[in-house]
């Protein structure tokens, strides 16, 4: 459903990704792992129209994404949850969720169902619906940004560093929810997780790609990558 072929991408004249190719099939969860600066976030930004594509092609359900503005890509059903959970601080938790439902705003029944579903994944937020999002803890803001991402019935969910800045127990909890969402959310056909914590990401995903210097250096099933000596040494040891 998503195909990236020979992608060159970056920012202005700075090229970060070099001839990068990857594929995500329907109903798959895929992890992108690699060191700081390897280009993982840039892959998500290129898909979302937020980084500059200099060459190659990104296709989503047969539609070429590169060259389209981010809001058109969002309309096609791609949701991006950025690394720094960007909640709208002055808005309440409920208002933040309603912003996420913009894509499906005309179908009030679907909006109601999706809001309920998002809150079922994150029941903790139910008690905070009328609170300003800016007062939530880091973990709660992460929950809200993921919930807001799925409220609009996306077909593909792009998650950038969901564990960043969270205590290990909170990160485990968030990844447990991500696994449930990726496997069970009715609109979702695929999820891509970019993560520094390679073990958490590979435990949740079926397949993974290892990025180094803007290129894919290794790809395989999560089980194969977890057992791979290079991955173990570079990314799985504390
Ligand atoms: P991290 O886990 O640290 O975010 P990453 O693998 O996700 O790493 P990217 O965020 O894709 O890496 O960054 C790849 C390179 O692109 C880095 O050298 C970074 O400094 C550079 N970069 C990222 N965003 C921009 C930008 N907006 N303008 C210029 N360079 C950027």
Image (cartoon, grey):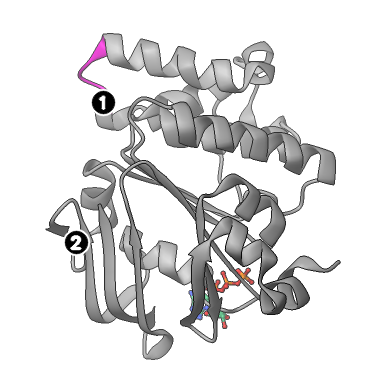
- Quadrant of ligand 1 in image: bottom right
Q: Residue at x 67, y 61 (%)?
A: 198
Give the CA separation, mark 2 to mark 1.
20 Å
The image quadrant that residue 2 belongs to is: bottom left
User: Dot 2: what SS?
Assistant: loop
The image quadrant that residue 161 belongs to is: bottom right
Say whether residue 90 is left or right of residue 138: left
User: Dot 1: what SS?
Assistant: helix
Q: Residue at x 32, y 51 (%)?
A: 25
Q: Is residue 36 above or below residue 61?
A: below
Question: In front: 24, or 227?
Answer: 227
Q: Would you say residue 84 is visible in this rendering?
A: yes
Residues rendered magenta in the picture: 104-108
How far from the left and from the top, in percent, is residue 208?
52, 62
Marker disc for residue 230: none
Q: Quadrant of the C terminus?
A: bottom right
Give the residue pinned by disc 1.
Answer: 104
Question: In front: 52, or 135?
Answer: 52
Ligand 1 neighbours mark 1 (CB distance < 8 Å): no
Ligand 1 neighbours mark 2 (CB distance < 8 Å): no
Q: Is residue 213 above or below residue 115?
A: below
Say whether residue 80 is left or right of residue 106: right
Give the residue pinned by disc 2.
Answer: 68
Q: Is residue 74 above or below residue 225?
A: above
């Amino acid at each position: 459903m998503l195909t990236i072929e020979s992608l060159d991408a970056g920012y202005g004249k700075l090229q970060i990704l070099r001839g990068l190719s990857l594929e995500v099939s329907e109903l798959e969860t895929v992890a992108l792992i690699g060191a700081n600066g390897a280009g993982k976030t840039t892959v998500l930004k290129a898909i979302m129209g937020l980084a500059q594509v200099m060459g190659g092609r990104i296709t989503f359900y047969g539609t070429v994404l590169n060259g389209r503005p981010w809001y058109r890509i969002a309309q096609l059903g791609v949701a991006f949850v950025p690394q720094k959970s960007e909640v709208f601080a002055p808005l309440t938790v409920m208002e933040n969720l309603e912003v996420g439902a913009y894509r499906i705003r005309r179908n009030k029944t679907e909006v109601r169902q999706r809001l309920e579903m998002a809150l079922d994944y994150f029941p903790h937020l139910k008690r905070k619906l009328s609170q300003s999002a800016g007062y939530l803890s880091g973990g709660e803001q992460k929950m809200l940004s993921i919930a807001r991402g799925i409220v609009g019935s996306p077909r593909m969910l792009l998650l950038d560093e969901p564990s960043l800045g969270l205590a290990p127990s909170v990160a485990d909890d968030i990844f447990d929810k991500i696994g449930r969402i990726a496997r069970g959310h009715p609109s979702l056909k695929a999820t891509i997780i970019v993560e520094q914590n390679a073990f958490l990401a590979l435990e949740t995903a079926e397949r993974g790609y290892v990025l180094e210097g803007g290129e894919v250096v290794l790809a395989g099933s999560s089980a194969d990558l977890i057992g791979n000596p290079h991955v173990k040494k570079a990314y799985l040891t504390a």
